[in-house]
Image (cartoon, helix red, strand yellow):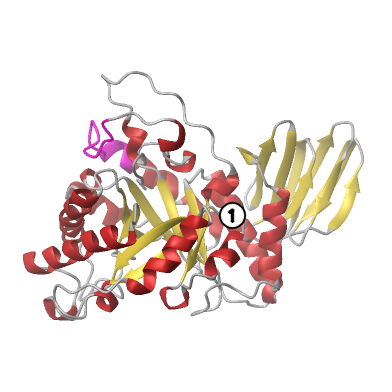
Amino acid sequence: MPFLSAALLLVAAALPSAPAQPQAPKPKLSDRLGVTVPARSLQPETAGAVQSLGVAWVRVVVPWGEVEKQQGVYDLSAWVAPLEELRRKHLKPIVVLTGANPLYDSGQAPNTPEGRAAYAAFCGQAAKQLKAHYLELWDEPDTAASWKPSPTAIGYAALVTDASRALRAVDKEAAIIAGGTLGADLDFHRAAFVAGLLGSVDAVAVHWEASVAPEASAAQLPALEAMIRQMRPVPPAVVSKTPRVGKDAPPPALAKEYPLLVTAYRLPAPGAGGEDGSAATLIRALASAAAAEVSLFCWEPAQAGAALPDMTSPTMAAWAKTQALLTGYEFFRRVELPSPLQGVSFRKGRREVTVFWSGSGGGSVDLRLKDGGAQVLDVQGKEVKTLPAGDSSVSLTESPVFVVGTVRVTGSKAG
């Protein structure tokens, strides 16, 4: 999924005639992480709670119908102070401009020139009044729930074309993100790309479904990335003409052409495993997204309507422990294991942490450890065992474990 701004698509410094640009720094894990805060729960004091999550991005939904209740009159006052506070806390807001407006096209998704022009005008006002630089256009346009009466990739591409013109009139370097689809949805993306979508956006987004295992969602992404590479404009239609470095450079997570983003992951409601199961699933999703090298992984609170989950819940405790453990780390490599076993390694200097789990059932991995051995921690950061130097084995379940130390996999067993 493409994605970014005043230097998002800086990525575009790859024009054949352009001089070689300094290579963007490799993003740390925290640079790639975000959380969605529901619109009705967004308050200035929310920024402090979000900052404590160790994320860089905050996805904020701005419903069109709540902003323009009278044609041509836009009330964005409810979002101004909270977004300013997020920026003051050095958090980057992604503003999602979405939702049909009953004033146009009989309350259906914009499907006429007048409706598309009205949505474009709303986008321009939102960018101007909210000083929004990162903008996601619509929310799940491939679903009938979001795009009534029925999804149309051609209609969506036309809407984005008009809206992107309005946005770039306000901020020529705006980072425009194609609205996240429900899953990779290759058929919808292919039709939208044929209709010219990639010529109007900087990044492509998908949403991961709660009902689909995160490993399965991640496995869908390579096909979408290949489609983007095959169908992207050459050179990209949206380009930053002036190379930017230093403080003006794009965030490292987004400094590449058409980055792919997971802008929403809805954590499943606690099932048989309760909150502990939800905690395990969240960490599996985070590690799967890192291994897929998506530029952004943004997850949504489990409780519908809550600004953030209960900060004392096992899910939030697991998230906090993971952030503390992996502070300053970057994705290193995916460990080759037989399905359904999974392994993802992170590195910070010479230090390594590897997350192991089984996508279904159980299993084990045989490890060879260097001098000093390794610690094995559960998702709550509690020590499960200490592994001495030499050969050891670690049992795996659907709840991830963290092996803190340099290891080499010498064998594995699924089931």
- Stretch in magenta: 228-241
Residue placed most toward the observer, 131 or 243: 131
Residue 353, position in %: x, y?
73, 43
Q: Amino acid at mark 1?
A: Leu
Mark 1 neighbour class, 10 Å CA radius: few under 14, some 14 to 19, many 20 or more:
many
Q: Residue at x 48, y 39 (%)?
A: 252
Tell me if residue 162 is in the magenta stretch. no
Q: Quadrant of residue 26?
A: top right
- Residue 142 figure quarter: bottom left
186 to the left or right of 254: left
Answer with left or right where residue 415 lies relative to residue 35: right
Q: What residue appears at the point 45 percent right and 67 percent down from the top-left corner?
A: 82
Residue at x 13%, y 81% (from the top left corner):
106
Which x, y percent locates residue 304? Answer: 50, 79
Tally of marks = 1
Q: Quadrant of the C terminus?
A: bottom right
Residue 299 coordinates in the image, percent (x, y): 52, 62
Farthest right residue?
388
Magenta span: predominant SS is loop
Q: Nearer the viewer, residue 291 or 391?
A: 291
At x 54%, y 39%, the residue is 27
State the residue position of label 1: 286
Label 1 SS? helix
Residue 124 position in % (x across, y down): 21, 59
